[in-house]
Image (tube, rainbow, N blue to C red):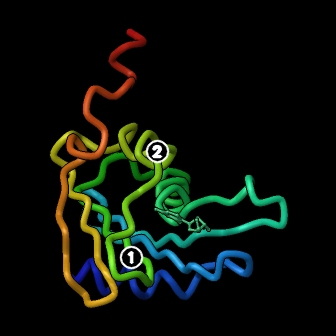
Amino acid sequence: MNLPKKAREAQNGSYSPYSKFRVGAALLTEEGEVILGANVENASYGLTCCAERNAFFKAVNEGKRKFKAIAVVGDMDGFCTPCGACRQVMDEFCGKDCEIVLINSKDELKILKMNDLLPFSFNGEHLV
Ligand code: THU
């Protein structure tokens, strides 16, 4: 299964009339299912929700709780690295070895681990 290709497909769901920056995310569950998400903007800009968080919230609402990888793509020369809020949400459901696959406009890949994106995270273990 081609997760980067799925992330590109997910861009079609983007609602981004303000930034015109379409971001797509494809989330791979532990069971091998792929859940897509795209960014949804709002005229009150701060209410915008990123592609990554939309993918996670959709998956979690469908009962998925564990994930192996997420692919993220934006139409840019560089890599669309997840924002801080998305990193915290991702960390809630991803182990430290979960793969974060970033794709640029030339279809080059950069593969990171959850631990690279958010080391020393605050997580559920701090609350027990
Ligand atoms: N955005 C994402 O969806 N994911 C990211 O990783 C970075 C930014 C969205 C939010 C907003 O709709 C647009 O990109 C510009 O910031």
Is disc 1 placed on a helix, strand or loop? strand
Q: Quadrant of the C terminus?
A: top left
Q: Are marks 1 and 2 in contact (CB under 8 Å)?
A: no
Residue 84 image label: 2
Residue at the image position 44 percent from the left and 39 percent from the top:
88
Is the distance from the Cβ of mark 1 to the nearest ligand 1 atom less than 8 Å? no
Above/below status of 29 relative to 105: above
Number of marks in the rendered image: 2
Q: Residue at x 23, y 56 (%)?
A: 68
Spatial distance from mark 1 to mark 2, Cα to Cα? 17 Å
Give the residue displayed 56% in from the left and 61% down from the top.
50
Query: What residue do we see at 42% from left, 69% from top?
Result: 35
Task: State the residue in front, 16 or 93.
Answer: 16
Instruction: Between residue 19 and residue 115, name the one nearer to us.
Output: 19
**Quadrant of the rendering where the N terminus is positioned:** bottom left
Task: Tell me which corner region of the image, top left, top right, bottom left or bottom right, holds residue 105.
Answer: bottom left
For mark 2, give the secondary structure: helix
Above or below, 57 relative to 88: below
Give the residue number, with chain letter if any, for mark 1: 73
Q: Which quadrant of the figure shows ligand 1?
A: bottom right
Looking at the image, residue 72 lies above or below residue 63: below
Q: Position of residue 7 (x, y in %)?
A: 38, 79
Question: Is 69 on the left or on the right of 73, as rendered?
Answer: left
**Camera-nearest residue between 81 and 61:** 81
Q: Amino acid at mark 1?
A: Val
Q: Earlier in the sequence, mark 1 or mark 2?
A: 1
Ligand 1 closer than 8 Å to the CB at disc 2?
no
